[in-house]
């Protein structure tokens, strides 16, 4: 089973509560998603590799660490995952951005892929796949499978709210991929929505509810 990391930081938990509220407007919702993503990203990136380089300060020459290797790749699952990109870019401004498009069949609740564009040298990059909601886990499983098929090797996934069913599905199918979630909720309802959840994250981010 893959590593499951459930966030416990009080700031993350507080902001997720605000995110859930029905009366949280579009602008505030977007801002909260971005802030939560940045806080989660700080936790998820503690193992980034570094190398030492020589620099000059206003005082003297010194050896100091910088991030090693190819620039990170952030891969949002469209469309809701776009809301999480800004928070991670605040931490790693030079990260490359990929996109994976998925939509959910409203009857079967199965994901359908319609787009995938990843940065070059994907096999050398630390990849962070982001999607605010992990419901059934189908979209995230398929997205990671596609990234692996294109050569991606160093993959982590970040979701703000997850259902136990989605966590089980994902960790069973991709036991090698660490999963970072802000909160694990109670269950899925008959329409495969997370309970208590926060509704449709994409609609609330883009104001289309």
Image (cartoon, helix red, strand yellow):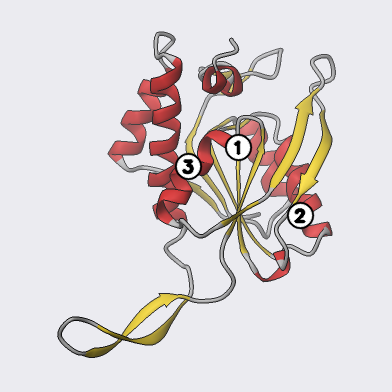
Q: Are marks 2 and 3 in contact (CB under 8 Å)?
A: no
From the viewer's perspective, is the residue at label 1 or at label 3 nearer?
3
From the viewer's perspective, is the residue at label 2 or at label 3 nearer?
3
Q: Residues within 10 Å of mark 3 (few under 14, many from 20)?
A: some
- Looking at the image, the residue that sits furthest to the left is 59
Q: Which percent across, then down, holds residue 205? A: 53, 23
Q: Is residue 142 left or right of residue 194?
A: right
Mark 2 or 3, nearer chain start: 3
Q: Which residue is mark 3?
A: 86
What distance separates the C-alpha of mark 2 from that of mark 3? Answer: 21 Å
Instruction: Locate residue 56: give its quadrant.
Output: bottom left
Mark 1 or 3, nearer chain start: 3
Residue at image position (26%, 89%) is 62
Vertical order, 13 against 141 (above or below): above
Mark 1 or 2, nearer chain start: 1
Per the image, label 1 sits on a secondary structure element best described as loop
Q: Which residue is mark 2?
A: 147
Q: Is residue 19 left or right of residue 58?
A: right
What distance separates the C-alpha of mark 1 from that of mark 3? Answer: 13 Å
What distance separates the C-alpha of mark 1 from that of mark 2? Answer: 15 Å
Q: Are marks 1 and 2 in contact (CB under 8 Å)?
A: no
Per the image, label 2 sits on a secondary structure element best described as helix
Vertical order, 115 against 163 (above or below): below
Which numbered tag is attached to residue 131? 1
């Amino acid at each position: 089973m893959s590593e499951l990391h459930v966030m416990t930081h009080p700031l993350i938990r507080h902001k997720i509560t605000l995110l859930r509220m029905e009366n949280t407007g579009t602008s505030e919702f977007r801002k909260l998603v971005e802030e939560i993503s940045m806080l989660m990203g700080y936790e998820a990136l503690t193992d980034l590799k570094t190398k030492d380089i020589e620099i000059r300060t206003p005082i003297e020459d010194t050896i100091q660490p910088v991030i090693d290797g190819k620039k990170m790749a952030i891969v949002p699952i469209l469309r809701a995952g776009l809301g999480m990109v800004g928070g991670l870019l605040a931490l790693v401004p030079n990260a490359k951005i990929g996109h994976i498009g998925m939509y959910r069949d409203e009857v079967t609740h199965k994901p359908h892929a319609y787009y995938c564009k990843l940065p070059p040298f994907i096999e050398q990059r630390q990849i962070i796949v982001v999607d605010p909601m992990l419901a059934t886990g189908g979209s995230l499983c398929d997205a990671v499978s596609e990234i692996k098929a294109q050569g991606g090797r160093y993959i982590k996934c970040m979701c703000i709210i997850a259902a136990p069913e989605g966590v089980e599905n994902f960790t069973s199918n991709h036991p090698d991929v660490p999963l970072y979630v802000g909160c694990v909720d109670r269950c899925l309802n008959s329409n495969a929505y997370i309970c208590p959840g926060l509704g449709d994250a994409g609609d609330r981010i883009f104001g289309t509810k």
